[in-house]
Amino acid sequence: MSTKLTNLKLKIWRQAGPDDAGRFETYEIPEISDEASFLEMLDILNERLIEQGDEAIVFDHDCREGICGTCSLMINGQAHGPQRASATCQLHMRTFNSGDEIVIEPWRARAFPIIKDLMVDRAAFDRIVESGGFISAPTGGAPDANLTPIPKPVADAAMDAAACIGCGACVAACPNGAASLFTSAKLSHLNRLPQGQAERFRRTEAMVDTMDDYFGSCTNHGECQAACPKEISIDMIALMNSDYRKAKFKNRKNLSRI
Ligand code: FES
């Protein structure tokens, strides 16, 4: 049987636009079911705000299943809230106690400017992917999946990297605002596989250089790994750094095809 959480107090960041200074506003929200998801709780709050003639709170969401990575909220100072290995949309109100005060903020990072309220612009991630995200090899039609044998540990490592949903929690949690976990995950899921070898070093140099244009530097705090809803390992960053060093040599010497 569902129970109700009463007298939840929400302190929510409201900001009219990118140039507004922004401020916290406090909302009392009674009678929320502990079965509601965190985003459903915000939906209910928005319905109540609209009913009383106030402006709804802007927040990002799409799949609500932990897949798309858009539901990016800092909850009580933790990216995606207190539940490990979960996106905000997978968080339920039973995680909280009646009477709790919950502070809800957008991602705080120079590379993710606030669009409005809790929504940020994560286009800097797109710039990284764009800079490396194509191949120049003519591939023809889709080959049979079993034509290229891939050892199981390699396939598993590539799949672990491909789990990244690009939510930006790694950047928001990092004291330097670094995007090394995101970039290394995107690189690792291609660079580990045989099909990713042809462009490996060109891709690595381009994506890391683009990352450096927008984001801070990694100094191995490890907050990114702790905040990642997909538990992507910072081992990926070590692999990226190793490939980047090789890329700097191979690309300079124009030996990337050797
Ligand atoms: S809404 Fe898609 S991951 Fe949360």
Image (cartoon, rainbow, N blue to C red):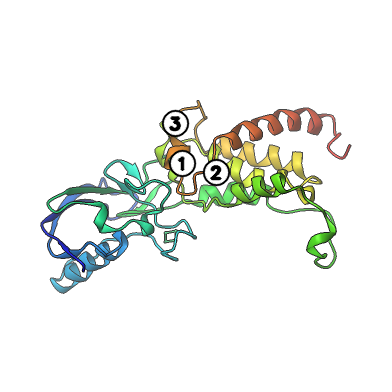
Report crowding for label 2: few under 14, some 14 to 19, many 20 or more residues within 10 A (C-alpha): many
- Distance between mark 1 and mark 2 Cα atoms: 7 Å
Q: Provide the secondary structure element on which disc 1 rests.
A: helix
Question: In terms of image quarters, where does ligand 1 lie?
Answer: bottom left
In the depicted structure, whether residue 78 falls above or below residue 49 = above
Q: Dividing the image into 4 quarters, which one contains the N terminus?
A: bottom left
Image depth: mark 2 or mark 3 in front: 2
Is residue 85 something that shows in the picture?
Answer: yes
Q: Is residue 204 left or right of residue 120?
A: right
Which residue does the numbered mark 2 point to in the structure image?
182
- Quadrant assignment, res 44: bottom left
In the depicted structure, whether residue 152 falls above or below residue 93 = above
Q: Provide the secondary structure element on which disc 3 rests.
A: loop
Q: Residue 96: x, y in percent? A: 22, 51
Q: Which mark is residue 48?
A: none
Amino acid at dot 3:
Asn
Q: Nearer the viewer, residue 66 or 186?
A: 66
Which residue does the numbered mark 1 point to in the structure image?
170
Cβ atoms under marks 1 and 2 closer than 8 Å: yes
Task: State which tag comes first along the sequence, 1 or 2.
Answer: 1
Residue at 22%, 61% in the rendered image = 34
Amino acid at dot 1:
Cys
Residue at 83%, 68% in the rendered image = 141
Which residue does the numbered mark 3 point to in the structure image?
176
Q: Residue 67: x, y in percent? A: 49, 60
Task: State which tag comes first along the sequence, 2 or 3.
Answer: 3
Q: Is residue 33 left or right of residue 63?
A: left
